[in-house]
Structures are given as structure tokens and as C-alpha cells.
Image (cartoon, grey):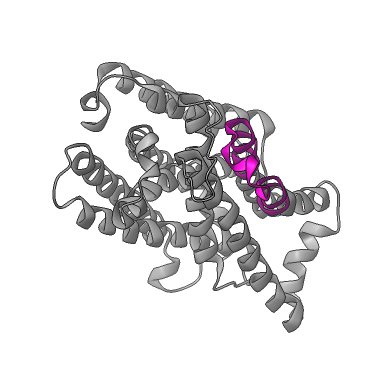
Amino acid sequence: MTGGRIVLFVLAGGIVALTQFGPLAKDGGSLLLTLLFWAAVIEGCIAVVAACTLIKAKWVASVKRELLSVHPLLLFVSVLFLFLTPFVDSYPWIGREGLWFDKGFFVGRNFVLLLLAYLAARRFAIASHRDEEGRERFAGIYLFVFVVSQSLMAFDWVMSLAYPWINTLMGGYFFIESLFGGFALSGILYAFLHGRPVPTHEPGGRSDLKDIAILLFGFSILWVGLFFAQFLVIWYGNLPEEVSYLLARVTSSPLRELSLSILALYFFIPFLVLLPGRSKTNPFVVFAVSVSILLGILVERFVYLAPVVSLHPLATAINFLALLILFVHGVMKKEAGGTVLKA
């Protein structure tokens, strides 16, 4: 990486360390929330390009370099995860017998998967930048690591906090949302880079923006299907440990209102706004819908954690802002491919 980026990473890491181990720290929940959001968004950006490479989608060319440019942040997220080591003691399964419940193995397996995601993303980004013949193979490898990484985040980072609550759909739920977030970032980047409405007069006409909007519209329907499938089983089974998980999030304010807002941010806004054909070619509309989806990811992660961990508002804001600055710096870096992709 360039010297400037290394300095930014060190400064951001120092700031996060101060919030994690300094006077603002409570039990690590603020950093966990930050990593859950940014790991989903960053991995989702690379996954979008990898999926488009495999199916030879044309629209991704408009934002491909910007989406790939954030892959060094996966290495940064891997290092930040190690800061959560003291927080692992607050998981309810700590002290149980078995290798899987060993604290060192918990930290090790998640760190290794995050590191593998970075290495796979880096190799794919380089192959994609150079138009290597084997880039489809590297895309497939990254997507495999991406699915495993996001699934383990769902099961290890989130679901095990609410033990004995168990949800086998949680892994798929997470990597679909991560991919959804990657498409949302594509819409935001397109609006910034090519922010003009693109007319498509003929019925079969296409534009990159229209393709992004159609994907956002389709994934909103996919998400609500997964949402319904997940909570239908909880309602039908009526098991105490499953129902209590919902009651903790829908019976008190402000979690009740936030839980309802997730449906609006993920489904109702994207579905209703993008339903008219004309809105799919308006970059300002697609931008607003994309922001709604990213906000939905953040609110949902907060609702998952708020009843079971302490979240310091100032520490959360500082951690989030540090990673946001690094993300924007990576995306907007305009030097020709080599500066970013050789990280």
C-alpha cells in the first residue's frame, strides 16, 4: 500500500483502540456493531464484482474499479477483530467444554476467515484489474470464502450472543444482505460518478443504472421472502427461547420502532419507490433507495445487539467514522489502478 494509506490505517487503528480499551469502552459492543456493518458492506462490494464476473454482467464496468478498491479494508477489519478478544468473555457459552467453545479457537477461526477473505479479494482484484484469463476462478474462490465468512459472522458473532436461540437460516440471511449492501453501494457510486438520468426510450432499452435499480428491486423481494421464512417458523413453533428473542426486540421502545423500520428500509421503500419504470433510470432516486438499504443493515445489526450488549453512542460514532473515512478514501482514490490494487 502507499505510505499515505498506511498512515491512515495506523491512525484509524489507534483511534479505535482508544475507544475499545479507553474510558469510553464498556464491553466491546460498539466495535462489534461497527465491524458487523462494515465487514458486510466491504465484503459485499467485492462479492458484487465477483458475481458479475462469473455471469459476465455489463453494468458493473461503471463502478468496478471503485468497488474493488476497498479490498485492503478487509485486512484492517481482520486486525480490528482481534481487539474484540476481551469481549468474547461476555458470550453466554464461555466456559462450556469442547474445542468449538474455546475462546482462542473462536478468535482464531474468525480471524483466519477474515484474513482469507482479504487474500481472496486481493488476488481477485489484481486478476480483474489485469484482465487475467483465470479471473473467473478467483471470483469463484472469493465468493466461496465470502459465503463462509458472512455465515460464520451470523452464527458466531451474533446468534451465539442470544444462546440458546438458534436459527439455521441466519447464515444465508447475512450473506444475502451483504450482497444487497454491495448493490446499494453500486447505486451510490454510480450516482456520484455518472449522476445524470439516462433515457431508455425503447421497451428493451438498458442502462447500467437501470440494471442496478432492477437488482435492488429484486433483492428487496428476496430479502422479504427470507424475512418471512425466518420468522414464520418462530411464530409457528411458538418455542419459548425463540419467542423470547422477538419479545425482547418488539415489546419496548425504541427497539419496537427500529424493528418496524427495518421492514420499511429493506423492503417497502425499495419496492414501492423502484416499482415505476421511470424511477429506475433516475440516479437521485436510486441513490436514495441505496442509502435506505445501507441504513437498514445498520439498524438491523443494532437491533440484534442492543438487548444483549452495551453500546456506547460516542464510541460507536467514532469507530464508525474512522472506517467511513478509510472507505471513502479507498473508493475515491483516483490514481490509475496500480496504487489501489497493489495493496
Q: In this view, does 82 lie above or below 220?
A: above
Which residue is rendered at x = 26% and y = 17% of the image?
3
Residue 184 highlighted magenta (yes or no): no
Residue placed furthest toward the left: 133
Q: Can residue 9 be seen in this view?
A: yes
Residue 293 at x, y percent in the picture: 62, 45
Q: Nearer the viewer, residue 218 or 89?
A: 218
Residue 26 at x, y percent in the picture: 63, 39
Residue placed furthest toward the right: 252
Magenta part of the protein: which range?
266-295
Q: What kind of secondary structure does the magenta stretch mostly adopt? A: helix
Q: In this view, does 308 lie above or below 60?
A: below
Residue 231 at x, y percent in the picture: 70, 71
Residue placed furthest toward the bottom: 237
| Image quadrant in which the N terminus is located | top left
Q: Can residue 309 be seen in this view?
A: no
Residue 31 at x, y percent in the picture: 54, 39
Q: Nearer the viewer, residue 89 or 126?
A: 126
Which residue is rendered at x = 55% and y = 40% of the image?
201
| Image quadrant in which the C terminus is located | top left
Left or right? Give the position of 29 relative to 15.
Answer: right
Which residue is rendered at x = 65% and y = 47% of the image?
274
Looking at the rendering, which quadrant does residue 123 occupy?
top left
Left or right? Give the position of 74 relative to 172.
Answer: left
Q: In this view, does 225 lie above or below 337?
A: below
Left or right? Give the position of 81 relative to 169.
Answer: left
Which residue is rendered at x = 16% and y = 38% of the image?
130
